[in-house]
Image (spheres, helix red, strand yellow):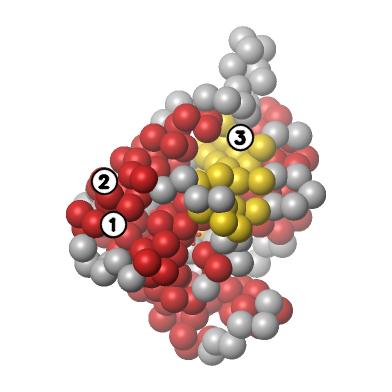
Protein backbone atom coordinates (compact mmCIF):
# COMPACT_ATOMS: atom_id res chain seq x y z
CA UNK A 1 0.00 0.00 0.00
CA UNK A 2 1.20 3.52 -0.65
CA UNK A 3 1.14 6.45 1.78
CA UNK A 4 -2.49 7.28 0.93
CA UNK A 5 -3.56 3.75 1.77
CA UNK A 6 -4.11 2.82 -1.88
CA UNK A 7 -3.15 -0.59 -3.16
CA UNK A 8 -0.03 -0.91 -5.26
CA UNK A 9 -0.61 -2.24 -8.78
CA UNK A 10 2.27 -3.19 -11.04
CA UNK A 11 1.25 -3.89 -14.65
CA UNK A 12 3.58 -6.11 -16.66
CA UNK A 13 2.66 -6.35 -20.33
CA UNK A 14 4.46 -7.75 -23.33
CA UNK A 15 4.46 -10.44 -26.01
CA UNK A 16 4.50 -14.22 -25.48
CA UNK A 17 7.78 -15.54 -24.10
CA UNK A 18 9.15 -12.21 -22.87
CA UNK A 19 9.43 -13.67 -19.36
CA UNK A 20 6.41 -11.89 -17.88
CA UNK A 21 5.02 -14.63 -15.65
CA UNK A 22 8.36 -15.79 -14.22
CA UNK A 23 9.40 -12.23 -13.44
CA UNK A 24 5.94 -11.13 -12.23
CA UNK A 25 5.77 -14.03 -9.74
CA UNK A 26 9.21 -13.23 -8.37
CA UNK A 27 8.55 -9.46 -8.13
CA UNK A 28 5.31 -10.17 -6.24
CA UNK A 29 7.13 -12.49 -3.84
CA UNK A 30 9.86 -9.95 -3.09
CA UNK A 31 7.39 -7.12 -2.52
CA UNK A 32 5.10 -9.36 -0.45
CA UNK A 33 2.07 -8.77 -2.70
CA UNK A 34 -0.13 -11.04 -4.84
CA UNK A 35 0.25 -12.07 -8.46
CA UNK A 36 -2.55 -12.18 -11.03
CA UNK A 37 -1.95 -14.13 -14.26
CA UNK A 38 -4.52 -12.75 -16.72
CA UNK A 39 -3.25 -14.94 -19.59
CA UNK A 40 -4.28 -17.97 -17.53
CA UNK A 41 -7.85 -16.64 -17.50
CA UNK A 42 -8.01 -16.50 -21.32
CA UNK A 43 -6.44 -19.96 -21.39
CA UNK A 44 -9.16 -21.32 -19.08
CA UNK A 45 -11.86 -20.15 -21.53
CA UNK A 46 -10.00 -21.72 -24.49
CA UNK A 47 -9.47 -24.95 -22.55
CA UNK A 48 -13.12 -25.26 -21.58
CA UNK A 49 -14.28 -24.54 -25.15
CA UNK A 50 -12.00 -27.29 -26.50
CA UNK A 51 -13.11 -29.72 -23.80
CA UNK A 52 -16.79 -29.06 -24.31
CA UNK A 53 -16.46 -29.23 -28.09
CA UNK A 54 -17.57 -25.62 -28.61
CA UNK A 55 -16.40 -24.41 -32.05
CA UNK A 56 -13.74 -21.74 -31.52
CA UNK A 57 -15.13 -19.70 -34.42
CA UNK A 58 -18.54 -19.40 -32.74
CA UNK A 59 -18.09 -16.01 -31.06
CA UNK A 60 -21.54 -16.02 -29.48
CA UNK A 61 -21.17 -19.44 -27.83
CA UNK A 62 -17.62 -18.70 -26.67
CA UNK A 63 -18.77 -15.39 -25.18
CA UNK A 64 -21.63 -17.11 -23.33
CA UNK A 65 -19.13 -19.67 -22.04
CA UNK A 66 -16.84 -16.88 -20.75
CA UNK A 67 -19.78 -15.14 -19.09
CA UNK A 68 -20.72 -18.26 -17.15
CA UNK A 69 -17.36 -19.73 -16.28
CA UNK A 70 -15.95 -19.56 -12.77
CA UNK A 71 -12.20 -18.97 -12.58
CA UNK A 72 -10.26 -19.00 -9.34
CA UNK A 73 -6.64 -19.04 -8.26
CA UNK A 74 -4.78 -20.62 -5.38
CA UNK A 75 -1.66 -18.80 -4.23
CA UNK A 76 1.04 -19.73 -1.78
CA UNK A 77 2.73 -23.09 -1.49
CA UNK A 78 0.56 -24.55 -4.22
CA UNK A 79 0.01 -22.30 -7.25
CA UNK A 80 -3.11 -23.45 -9.04
CA UNK A 81 -5.84 -22.30 -11.44
CA UNK A 82 -9.37 -23.69 -11.22
CA UNK A 83 -12.18 -23.74 -13.77
CA UNK A 84 -15.58 -24.36 -12.17
CA UNK A 85 -13.74 -26.00 -9.28
CA UNK A 86 -11.55 -28.26 -11.44
CA UNK A 87 -7.75 -27.92 -11.19
CA UNK A 88 -6.66 -26.97 -14.75
CA UNK A 89 -3.16 -25.65 -13.92
CA UNK A 90 -1.40 -28.13 -16.21
CA UNK A 91 -4.13 -28.52 -18.81
CA UNK A 92 -4.21 -24.83 -19.76
CA UNK A 93 -0.50 -24.96 -20.78
CA UNK A 94 -1.23 -27.57 -23.45
CA UNK A 95 -0.06 -26.78 -27.01
CA UNK A 96 -3.64 -27.13 -28.24
CA UNK A 97 -4.80 -24.48 -25.77
CA UNK A 98 -1.87 -22.21 -26.74
CA UNK A 99 -2.95 -22.40 -30.38
CA UNK A 100 -6.62 -21.73 -29.58
CA UNK A 101 -6.26 -18.94 -27.04
CA UNK A 102 -5.49 -15.93 -29.26
CA UNK A 103 -8.73 -16.36 -31.22
CA UNK A 104 -10.76 -16.71 -28.04
CA UNK A 105 -9.00 -13.64 -26.57
CA UNK A 106 -9.88 -11.56 -29.64
CA UNK A 107 -13.62 -11.67 -28.88
CA UNK A 108 -14.74 -8.38 -27.23
CA UNK A 109 -17.40 -10.13 -25.11
CA UNK A 110 -14.82 -12.52 -23.68
CA UNK A 111 -12.44 -9.65 -22.94
CA UNK A 112 -15.17 -7.53 -21.30
CA UNK A 113 -16.07 -10.33 -18.92
CA UNK A 114 -12.47 -11.21 -18.00
CA UNK A 115 -11.43 -7.56 -17.65
CA UNK A 116 -14.33 -7.09 -15.22
CA UNK A 117 -13.07 -10.02 -13.13
CA UNK A 118 -9.50 -8.67 -13.27
CA UNK A 119 -10.58 -5.21 -12.10
CA UNK A 120 -12.65 -6.75 -9.30
CA UNK A 121 -9.62 -8.74 -8.14
CA UNK A 122 -7.45 -5.61 -8.21
CA UNK A 123 -9.79 -3.72 -5.86
CA UNK A 124 -9.06 -6.31 -3.18
CA UNK A 125 -5.32 -5.79 -2.75
CA UNK A 126 -1.87 -5.00 -4.06
CA UNK A 127 -1.01 -7.02 -7.15
CA UNK A 128 1.53 -7.63 -9.85
CA UNK A 129 -0.69 -8.22 -12.89
CA UNK A 130 0.70 -9.66 -16.11
CA UNK A 131 -0.96 -9.67 -19.52
CA UNK A 132 -1.17 -7.74 -22.77
CA UNK A 133 -3.51 -4.83 -22.00
CA UNK A 134 -3.05 -4.24 -18.27
CA UNK A 135 -1.34 -0.83 -18.42
CA UNK A 136 -3.34 0.39 -21.40
CA UNK A 137 -6.83 -0.88 -20.58
CA UNK A 138 -7.39 -3.00 -17.46
CA UNK A 139 -5.58 -0.84 -14.89
CA UNK A 140 -4.65 2.43 -16.64
CA UNK A 141 -4.08 3.99 -13.20
CA UNK A 142 -1.48 1.39 -12.17
CA UNK A 143 1.38 3.04 -10.32
CA UNK A 144 4.05 1.07 -12.18
CA UNK A 145 3.80 -0.03 -15.82
CA UNK A 146 6.41 -2.25 -17.38
CA UNK A 147 6.53 -3.46 -20.98
CA UNK A 148 8.76 -6.54 -21.23
CA UNK A 149 10.02 -7.58 -24.59
CA UNK A 150 12.79 -9.65 -26.25
CA UNK A 151 13.69 -10.73 -29.77
CA UNK A 152 11.53 -13.44 -31.38
CA UNK A 153 14.59 -15.76 -31.49
CA UNK A 154 15.26 -15.36 -27.77
CA UNK A 155 11.60 -15.79 -26.81
CA UNK A 156 11.27 -18.94 -28.94
CA UNK A 157 14.45 -20.38 -27.47
CA UNK A 158 13.18 -19.81 -23.91
CA UNK A 159 9.80 -21.45 -24.64
CA UNK A 160 11.49 -24.36 -26.36
CA UNK A 161 13.76 -24.99 -23.35
CA UNK A 162 10.80 -24.66 -20.97
CA UNK A 163 8.89 -27.27 -22.99
CA UNK A 164 11.89 -29.56 -23.03
CA UNK A 165 12.21 -29.33 -19.25
CA UNK A 166 8.56 -30.10 -18.68
CA UNK A 167 8.72 -33.05 -21.08
CA UNK A 168 6.68 -31.45 -23.90
CA UNK A 169 7.87 -32.52 -27.35
CA UNK A 170 8.15 -29.53 -29.67
CA UNK A 171 10.71 -28.32 -32.19
CA UNK A 172 12.29 -24.87 -32.17
CA UNK A 173 10.64 -24.20 -35.54
CA UNK A 174 7.18 -25.01 -34.17
CA UNK A 175 7.67 -22.79 -31.13
CA UNK A 176 8.97 -19.92 -33.31
CA UNK A 177 5.98 -20.22 -35.65
CA UNK A 178 3.58 -20.26 -32.67
CA UNK A 179 5.16 -17.16 -31.11
CA UNK A 180 5.13 -15.26 -34.42
CA UNK A 181 1.51 -16.15 -35.03
CA UNK A 182 0.46 -15.12 -31.50
CA UNK A 183 2.41 -11.83 -31.79
CA UNK A 184 0.47 -11.09 -34.97
CA UNK A 185 -2.93 -11.99 -33.55
CA UNK A 186 -2.38 -10.25 -30.19
CA UNK A 187 -1.12 -6.97 -31.69
CA UNK A 188 -3.47 -6.79 -34.66
CA UNK A 189 -6.77 -7.57 -32.99
CA UNK A 190 -9.20 -4.66 -33.10
CA UNK A 191 -10.22 -4.61 -29.44
CA UNK A 192 -7.56 -3.85 -26.77
CA UNK A 193 -4.52 -5.04 -28.76
CA UNK A 194 -1.05 -5.53 -27.32
CA UNK A 195 0.62 -2.14 -27.34
CA UNK A 196 2.98 -0.14 -25.15
CA UNK A 197 1.25 2.24 -22.68
CA UNK A 198 2.42 5.84 -23.04
CA UNK A 199 3.80 5.87 -19.49
CA UNK A 200 5.28 2.34 -19.50
CA UNK A 201 8.94 1.60 -18.93
CA UNK A 202 10.20 -0.70 -21.69
CA UNK A 203 12.64 -3.42 -20.67
CA UNK A 204 14.25 -5.50 -23.43
CA UNK A 205 15.11 -8.76 -21.68
CA UNK A 206 17.25 -10.15 -24.54
CA UNK A 207 20.51 -11.19 -22.90
CA UNK A 208 19.32 -10.34 -19.37
CA UNK A 209 18.83 -12.93 -16.62
CA UNK A 210 15.57 -13.36 -14.69
CA UNK A 211 17.37 -11.99 -11.63
CA UNK A 212 18.50 -8.85 -13.48
CA UNK A 213 15.01 -8.12 -14.79
CA UNK A 214 13.37 -8.85 -11.42
CA UNK A 215 15.80 -6.60 -9.53
CA UNK A 216 15.22 -3.78 -12.00
CA UNK A 217 11.42 -3.91 -11.59
CA UNK A 218 11.61 -4.19 -7.79
CA UNK A 219 13.82 -1.11 -7.77
CA UNK A 220 11.39 0.80 -10.03
CA UNK A 221 8.48 -0.22 -7.78
CA UNK A 222 10.27 0.83 -4.58
CA UNK A 223 11.04 4.24 -6.04
CA UNK A 224 7.54 4.79 -7.44
O1 LIG B 1 0.52 -14.90 -21.39
P1 LIG B 1 -0.13 -16.13 -22.01
O2 LIG B 1 0.69 -16.77 -23.10
O3 LIG B 1 -0.55 -17.15 -20.98
O4 LIG B 1 -1.45 -15.56 -22.68
C1 LIG B 1 -2.35 -16.39 -23.36
C2 LIG B 1 -3.09 -15.63 -24.46
O5 LIG B 1 -4.03 -14.73 -23.89
C3 LIG B 1 -2.20 -14.82 -25.41
O6 LIG B 1 -2.35 -15.29 -26.72
C4 LIG B 1 -2.72 -13.42 -25.32
C5 LIG B 1 -3.96 -13.47 -24.52
N1 LIG B 1 -3.99 -12.44 -23.47
C6 LIG B 1 -4.63 -11.27 -23.74
O7 LIG B 1 -5.12 -11.10 -24.84
N2 LIG B 1 -4.75 -10.33 -22.76
C7 LIG B 1 -4.21 -10.53 -21.56
N3 LIG B 1 -4.34 -9.57 -20.63
C8 LIG B 1 -3.50 -11.71 -21.27
C9 LIG B 1 -3.40 -12.66 -22.27
- Residue under the image location 58 percent in, 74 percent down: 159
* Discs 2, 1 touching: Cβ within 8 Å: yes
Q: Quadrant of residue 62?
A: bottom left
| Circle 2 or circle 3, nearest the eye | 2
Q: Position of residue 206 (x, y in %)?
A: 59, 65
Residue 113 shows in the view = yes
* Discs 2, 3 touching: Cβ within 8 Å: no
In this view, the residue in front, 202 or 20, is: 20
- Residue under the image location 34 percent in, 41 percent down: 113
Left or right: where 106 falls relative to 18: left
Which residue position holds label 1? 62
Which residue position holds label 2? 109
Tell me the SS state at disc 3: strand
Q: Position of residue 132 (x, y in %)?
A: 43, 50
Label drawn at residue 127: 3
| Circle 2 or circle 1, nearest the eye | 1
Left or right: where 210 falls relative to 95: right
Which of the marked residues, 2 or 1, is nearer the chain's N terminus?
A: 1
Amino acid sequence: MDRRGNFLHIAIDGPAGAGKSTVAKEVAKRLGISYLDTGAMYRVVAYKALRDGIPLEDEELITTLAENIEISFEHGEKEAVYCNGEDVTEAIRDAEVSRAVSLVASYPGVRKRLVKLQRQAATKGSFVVDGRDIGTHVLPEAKVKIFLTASVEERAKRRYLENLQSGKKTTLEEVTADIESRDRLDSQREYAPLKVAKDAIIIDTTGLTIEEVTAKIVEIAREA
